[in-house]
Amino acid sequence: MTKLTDDQKEKLVKLYNQGFTAIELAEKFGITKGYVYLITSQYGVVKNKVVSQEDRKKIIKDYQNKEQIDSILSKYKISRRSLYRILDENNIPKRQGRNKKKN
């Protein structure tokens, strides 16, 4: 098994907290999923939760009802990446950014 430096471990933890899955990180760093969880637990990180189908429906409804993104993230304790993944999986178009000019 590949041994990671402290810098690599810190980068892994940062990416995990940004919403990357253990599988994605295992592939990126050339380690096992179990090693990802070992590192994150050593750094006191709580395992990313799986979003239930019921919550996914509520998240989509809130998003379509124009609830603020930060409010959705806080309400369901998910990352921005998780929100966008749920939207993509359900073919929900993302909102246009605030700074975009309308013609």
Image (cartoon, helix red, strand yellow):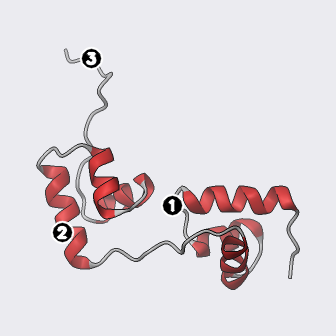
Alpha-carbon span between mark 1 and mark 2: 19 Å
In the displayed structure, does residue 43 sit left or right of residue 90? right
Rate crowding at label 1 as few (under 14), some (14 to 19) or many (20 or more) other CA atoms within 10 Å: some
> Residue at (28%, 58%) from the top-left corner?
75
> Could you say whether the residue bearing mark 2 is in a helix, strand or loop?
helix
Q: Position of residue 28 (x, y in %)?
A: 70, 65
Against 51, residue 79 (above or below) is above
Residue 77 quadrant: bottom left
Residue under numbered circle 2: 57
Q: Quadrant of the C terminus?
A: top left
Residue under numbered circle 3: 101
Q: Are marks 1 and 3 in contact (CB under 8 Å)?
A: no
> Could you say whether the residue bearing mark 3 is in a helix, strand or loop?
loop
Q: Earlier in the sequence, mark 3 or mark 2?
A: 2
Callout 1 amino acid: Gly
Q: Position of residue 69 (x, y in %)?
A: 29, 46
Callout 2 amino acid: Lys
> Residue at (66%, 75%) from the top-left corner?
41
Residue placed most toward the observer, 83 or 43? 43
Q: How many marks?
A: 3
Against 81, residue 25 (above or below) is below
Q: Earlier in the sequence, mark 1 or mark 3?
A: 1
* Residue 19: numbered disc: 1
Callout 3 amino acid: Lys
